[in-house]
Image (cartoon, rainbow, N blue to C red):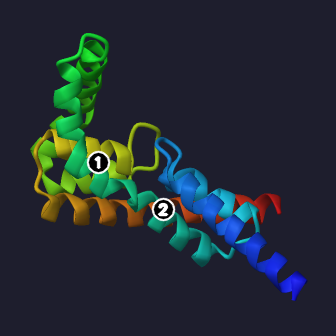
C-alpha cells in the first residue's frame, strides 16, 4: 500500500510540475512539454497537461488586466512601468492583431518564440478590448498549434540525442 501511495504522489508531483511550469509567463508550454517528456511522461500526456496549464491564466488576464493596469497607472510607483508594458505590447503585437483580427491573435500565440504565447496574446487582446468570446478560442487554437510545433521539435531532439 505504501508503494502505491508513493507512486501516486510521484506521478501527481510530475503532473503538477508540468502544469505549473506551463502556467508561468515566458516558459509556458514551450518549456513544459520538454520538461514533461524529460520527466518520463508520454508525449500525449505531457502535451495535454501543458495545454491545460498554459490556458489557466488566460481568463484571469483577459478579465482583470485592464482594471489592474488602469489602477496602477494612477500610482506614482508603477505608472512608467505600466505605460512601457502597454506600449511595448501594443506596438509589437497589437498592430498584427488589429490588422488581422482573430487570425493575428492565433498566429501571435502559435509562434513558439519568446515574446509570443498565451500571456502576450492575452495581454494584447485585453488591451485591444477584444471580446472574450473571440479572444479565448483564438488563444486556445494558437496554443494548440504551438503545442504541436513544440512537441514535434522536442520529439525530434529526443530521438536524435536519445
Q: Is residue 39 left or right of residue 141?
A: right
Residue displayed at 57% across by 65% down: 152
- The picture places residue 26, in percent across and down from the top left corner, at 48, 41
Q: Is residue 89 left or right of residue 4?
A: left
User: Badge 2 local density, few (<14 within 10 Å), some, or many (20+)?
Assistant: many
Which residue is under mark 2?
A: 53
With respect to residue 5, does 18 lie above or below?
above
Quarter holding the N terminus? Answer: bottom right
Mark pair 1, 2: CA separation:
14 Å
Q: Is residue 74 visible?
A: yes
Residue sitting at the far top: 76
Residue displayed at 53% across by 45% down: 27
User: Badge 1 local density, few (<14 within 10 Å), some, or many (20+)?
Assistant: many
Of the image marks 1 and 2, the number of the one nearer the N terminus: 2
Q: Is residue 96 visible?
A: no
With respect to residue 66, does 41 lie above or below?
below
Residue displayed at 26% across by 22% down: 82
- Of residue 45 and residue 8, the one placed in the foreground of this image is 8
- Of residue 88 and residue 65, the one placed in the foreground of this image is 65
Secondary structure found at label 1: helix
Q: Is residue 7 left or right of residue 99?
A: right
Quarter holding the C terminus? Answer: bottom right
- The picture places residue 155, in percent across and down from the top left corner, at 66, 65
Q: Which mark is residue 22?
A: none
Which residue is under mark 1?
A: 61
Amino acid at each position: 500500500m505504501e508503494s502505491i501511495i508513493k507512486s501516486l504522489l510521484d506521478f501527481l508531483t510530475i503532473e503538477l510540475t508540468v502544469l505549473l511550469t506551463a502556467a508561468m509567463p515566458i516558459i509556458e508550454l514551450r518549456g513544459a512539454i520538454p520538461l514533461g517528456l524529460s520527466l518520463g511522461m508520454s508525449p500525449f500526456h505531457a502535451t495535454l497537461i501543458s495545454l491545460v496549464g498554459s490556458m489557466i491564466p488566460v481568463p484571469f488576464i483577459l478579465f482583470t488586466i485592464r482594471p489592474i493596469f488602469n489602477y496602477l497607472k494612477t500610482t506614482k510607483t508603477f505608472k512608467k512601468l505600466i505605460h512601457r508594458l502597454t506600449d511595448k505590447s501594443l506596438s509589437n503585437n497589437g498592430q498584427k492583431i488589429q490588422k488581422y483580427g482573430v487570425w493575428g491573435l492565433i498566429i501571435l500565440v502559435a509562434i513558439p518564440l519568446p515574446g509570443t504565447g498565451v500571456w502576450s496574446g492575452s495581454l494584447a487582446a485585453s488591451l485591444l478590448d477584444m471580446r472574450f468570446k473571440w479572444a479565448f478560442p483564438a488563444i486556445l487554437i494558437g496554443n494548440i498549434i504551438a503545442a504541436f510545433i513544440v512537441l514535434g521539435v522536442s520529439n525530434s531532439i529526443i530521438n536524435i540525442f536519445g
